[in-house]
Amino acid sequence: DSEAMSTCKKTRAEATSVVSSDRLSSLLPKINGNVLSRLDVREAVRTSTLSSTWRDAWTDMPKISLRDRNFTRTRFVTLVDMVLALHKGTIEEFDISGKKSYHDELARWMLVLSRRSPRSVTIKLNSGPYKISSCLFSICDLKFLQLENCIISLPRAFQGFKSLTYLSLNIFSSTDRDIQNLISFCPVLTDLILTSFEGINRLNIQAPKLEYLNVYGDFEDINLEAPNLKVAILYLGHQAKLYQSVPIGYDKENHVKKSLGSLSEIKTLGITGSFMKVSYY
């Protein structure tokens, strides 16, 4: 009897295992992709060895996160190339970061990515600065864009990011005109972060939907046209100190005073740096 009972339990366990396996394998490809999106890309690719059903499941991952970490440069480049070439589903979010140099590959990756129309793109490559390819600026459906260690140079054909709500640029260089156009061509932008930048003297921010602004860097002046701004954090470096040594009340070219006075919806305002030393007359 005990032997029969043991056999019965074993059979029942095997049956349960088969049912569980079948249930797991019978998940829709889209669901499989969502499950794998919670894993590192390397781990997600490894699931292809589980069964024939999971062999290509990682190619439907809607969120792709790539980190070079312990990879050699060559192996990481191979991984990124493979993921972008073999992925066949919708790429909703693309996030890549690394400490090694990928100057020769970034433009190629951006070209492939631009054809997939992601909604969110994050690029944090420490061995910069990298010139952002014009292909990236053709992704018209972007809602979230975060770039680091880069050079921003808008292509002449830039039509704007009509759906972009979040823009963060850190450790970058650009020009007054390019940054002005980039921001003004994002009509629904609500969050803007500009930190540690070069090449910008006067910030001209025209953003009717903007609610959060964080600016940290050396610049001479700022013109804000953001009627819905609720939180503004501004740090003006030493350039502002030299420029604003003239009393601001007599400086018709300076927009800082006028900008701050026009923020009717502001709830939080933080200003640090030499701006605090300006005298009003």
Image: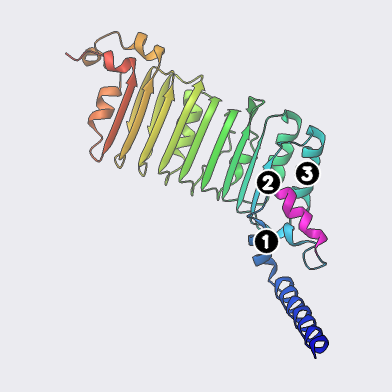
Residue 159 visible in the snapshot: no
Upstream in sequence: badge 2 or badge 1: 1
* Protein image colouring: rainbow
Circle 3: is it few (<14), some (14-19), or many (20+) Cα within 10 Å? some
Q: Decide: is 268 above or below 221.
A: below
Which residue lies under the disc numbered 2? 113
Task: Give the amino acid at mark 1.
Answer: Gly
Q: Residue at x 36, y 44 (%)?
A: 209
Which residue lies under the disc numbered 1? 33
Mark 1 → mark 3, Cα distance in angstroms: 18 Å
Q: Is residue 49 left or right of residue 248?
A: right
Which residue lies under the disc numbered 3? 79
Residue 41: x percent and y percent?
71, 49
The quarter of the image holding the C terminus is top left
The boundaries of the magenta stretch are: 41-50
Work out whether residue 36 or residue 202 is closer to the camera in this orientation and state it: 36
Work out whether residue 232 or residue 259 is closer to the camera in this orientation and state it: 232
Q: Decide: is 117 above or below 3.
A: above
For the residues carrying marks 2 and 1, which lies nearer the camera in this image? 1
Q: Decide: is 7 above or below 79.
A: below
Task: Give the amino acid at mark 3.
Answer: Leu
Question: Element type at marker 3?
Answer: helix
